[in-house]
């Protein structure tokens, strides 16, 4: 929450906007319901820090921030949820590419961002190397089957839970009645009704590239979370490395 506040403030928003964004991210249903997966939450906690460091690097033209970025990548990987870390890096690279293009930073920034990411990965090698070995010995050794890859895709009718989170019941109350589709915690996309309204207002009132970028990122995350219910998700299955990951609704992190 604090890092999201700092990120928004670095973009020139008012304090109340930064506070609202921090609370929405840290206390959303998507994050809080994963209290049973602290490693996932730990990875998510570093995502706004990564975006902040990218923003500060481009705004102040001080490359030292990217050294801290390498450290954050390392800490994120050490948290122990590679899938969430990869999705976070995907969002950060997209944002970095967009901001570099908007400010005319050129290929030098892109090369520096990739290089520092590699440094962070190497620093986390003490955990990543045993993880790679474990994957080779597990049922993911050759990648997941298509059915496992798309398991717990977000059914389109579940979009109603953006407004009514308990429409299909709530596992905390023992009323969840749609277990055949997937676990309640994996299908929860609720962030609150007011945040959605504020996001719509921001798109209408803030005519800047950053607002448009994050709106587009949220939309892409929501579409990818639909998994097997969209035609484009099959493309991810063909991308090297991504076939080791499952549960498309984890793309709701972007949303």
Image (spheres, grey):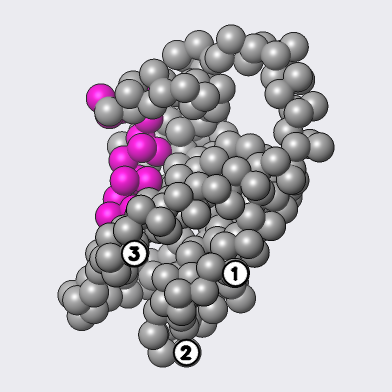
Question: Is the magenta region chiefly helix, strand or loop?
Answer: helix
Q: Mark 1 points at which residue?
A: 64
Q: In this view, does 197 lie above or below 166?
A: below
Asked which secondary structure carries label 2, the reply is helix
Q: Name the spot of residue 198 as percent of width and height, x first.
A: 32, 74
Which element is circle 3 on?
loop
Circle 3 crowding by C-alpha within 10 Å: few under 14, some 14–19, many from 20: some
- Estimate the x, y position of residue 31 in percent, counting from the top left: 58, 56
Left or right: residue 60 compared with residue 224: right
Q: Residue at x 58, y 10 (%)?
A: 142
Q: Name the residue under label 2.
A: 15
User: Do callouts 3 and 1 mark residues in contact (Cβ within 8 Å)?
Assistant: no
Crowding at dot 2, Cα within 10 Å, few <14 / some 14-19 / many 20+, comes out as: few
Is 182 placed left or right of 136 in the picture?
left
Mark yes or no: residue 10 visible. yes
Q: Is residue 92 within the magenta segment?
A: no
- Residue 61, position as x, y percentages in the image: 45, 74
> What residue is shown at x 72% (from left), y 53% (from top)?
75
The residue range painted magenta reads 215-231
Nearer to us of marks 2 and 3 is 3
Front-lying residue, 1 or 89: 89
Task: Measure the C-alpha gap from mark 2 to mark 3.
Answer: 28 Å
Quarter of the figure with the N terminus: bottom right
Q: Where is residue 9 in the image (x, y as percent from the top left)?
A: 47, 83
Q: Distance between the residues labelled 3 and 1?
A: 16 Å
Residue 49, quarter of picture? bottom right
Whichever of labels 3 and 1 marks the residue nearer the N terminus, that label is 1
Q: What residue is disc 3 on?
A: 105
């Amino acid at each position: 929450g604090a890092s999201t506040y700092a990120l928004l403030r670095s973009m020139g928003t008012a304090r109340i906007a930064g506070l609202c964004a921090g609370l929405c991210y840290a206390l959303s249903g998507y994050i809080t319901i994963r209290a049973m997966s602290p490693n996932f939450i730990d990875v998510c906690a570093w995502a706004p820090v990564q975006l902040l460091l990218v923003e500060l690097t481009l705004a102040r033209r001080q490359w030292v921030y990217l050294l801290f970025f390498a450290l954050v990548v390392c800490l994120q990987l050490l948290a122990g949820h590679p899938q969430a870390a990869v999705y976070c890096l995907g969002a950060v690279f997209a944002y970095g590419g967009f901001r570099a293009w908007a400010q005319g930073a050129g290929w030098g920034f892109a090369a520096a961002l990739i290089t520092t990411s590699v440094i962070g990965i190497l620093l986390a090698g003490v955990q990543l190397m045993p993880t790679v070995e474990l994957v080779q010995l597990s049922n993911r050794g050759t990648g997941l089957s298509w059915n496992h890859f798309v398991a717990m895709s977000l059914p389109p009718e579940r979009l109603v839970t953006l407004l009514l989170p308990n429409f299909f019941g709530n596992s905390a109350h023992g009323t969840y009645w749609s277990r055949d589709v997937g676990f309640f915690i994996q299908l929860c996309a609720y962030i609150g009704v007011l945040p959605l309204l504020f996001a719509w207002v921001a798109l209408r009132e803030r005519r800047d590239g950053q607002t448009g970028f994050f709106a587009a990122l949220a939309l892409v995350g929501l579409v990818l979370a639909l998994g097997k219910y969209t035609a484009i998700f099959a493309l991810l299955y063909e991308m090297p490395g991504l076939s080791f990951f499952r549960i498309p609704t984890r793309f709701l992190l972007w949303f």
